[in-house]
Amino acid sequence: LFDALDDQPLDAMLTLLHLLRNDPRSDKIDLGIGVYGDDNGCTPVMQAAKMAERNLIETQTSKAYLAAEGDAHFINLLAQRVLGGAEVNRYCGVQTPGGTGALRLAAELIHKANPEARVWLGTPTWINHHALIRSAGLHILEHPFFDQATQSVLFDEMMTALESARTGDVVLLHACCHNPTGADFTPAQWRTIGELVNRKGLIPLIDIAYQGLGHGMEADAAAMRTLLDSVPEAIIAASCSKNFGLYRERIGALWVKADSATAALRARGNLILIARAMWSMPPDHGAAVVRTILDSTDLTQIWLTELEQMRTRLNSMRAELAKAVPQLASVAQQSGMFALLPLNREAVADLRVKHGIYMVENGRMNIAGLQAGNLPRFAAALKPYLQG
Ligand code: LMR
């Protein structure tokens, strides 16, 4: 049986992780996978999460299954943070294994509802988006999003490309902290997207994986919520990996906004059926941690303070990098964990081989991998590869 399989290369992110782990240099700089690091290069468990875990150990009385849709209380509490005061009866939500699980579930639901739907992805987008959408059997179309050389959003080009979208097509949008570019739409651009989506009958699929790491939990969701209020149907895939620091626990959620409460209930039944056939029940521990935090005013405050510290550090590293490398001034205007530097693959490989600096092959750097101690060395190594 297995002789029929083709060899498969690791994707760019996993390859990088492998190379990094096998590099013995003590001064290597990890700007690869999207994990927050503090100024010592550590990814600590957040205090709020530790306190919630202690609480769970004391109070949790059973590990019996919850339900295919996960922990309903977790979903409701998270919905308040992600969706705000949305018209809840037109939404249904389920807990998923990470934001990736949410996206995969979304892709399966879209395929089940309309196998002919095509999904529009910006160029570039998170490298796993392609595989996730394709795995569900959906056809992908691409529209321009970002010009790496000029560091600008190609908004007019994107709108022009989306004019050829068909009614029922899906357009994937990053709510904030775009991965891999850090470049987000302006509020006016979000409004224009809303108009186009409504005029052409498109379905927004919104990936919100970095909420809170750009301008704050509310600010990072604001534009998405305005769009959601203006469209009849939408899908929202959220992750708690980064903003709760619970990466390996795999916590996320998927919401569908339908055009009626009845359609939302039907969507819910379909989500549960699909999830049951993929993972049966989502993992609970991380969701229980998030639920415990969001259910307590004190823990929520501790979590928000820690999140703010992370965001402040990211923004100060952006400012420091822009100051040290004037060609990267735009990095200070971008938000979240990533920047897509104007580097070709050879330059990225050179930086890795000669300087032990690890970035994704497309030039994406994780800003959180910068520290006061390694930034000068990174800036000096980078300069010869930049124009101007
Ligand atoms: C990233 O973009 O680095 C993260 O979302 C982690 C991943 O799985 O790619």
Image (tube, rainbow, N blue to C red):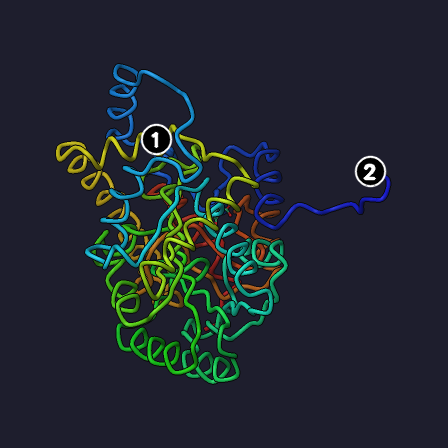
Quadrant, the N terminus: top right
203 lies left or right of 75: right
Residue name at image x 22 percent, y 59 percent: 219
Q: Tell me if mark 2 has few (under 14), some (14-19) or many (20+) residues whose alpha carbon lies within 10 angstroms of its own.
A: few
Q: Residue 44 carries which label?
A: 1
**Residue farthest left in this picture:** 297
Amino acid tagged 1: Pro
Mark 1 / mark 2, whichever is N-terminal: 2
- Looking at the picture, tell me which residue is in the foreground, 358 or 147: 147
Q: Distance between the residues labelled 1 and 2?
A: 40 Å
Residue name at image x 36 percent, y 76 percent: 193
Q: Which mark is residue 320?
A: none
- Looking at the picture, tell me which residue is in the foreground, 274 or 329: 274
Where in the figure is residue 297, as x and y percent of width and height? 13, 35
Instruction: Name the residue carrying label 2.
Output: 2
- Looking at the picture, tell me which residue is in the foreground, 193 or 177: 193
Amino acid tagged 2: Phe
Where in the figure is residue 367, as x and y percent of width and height? 39, 51
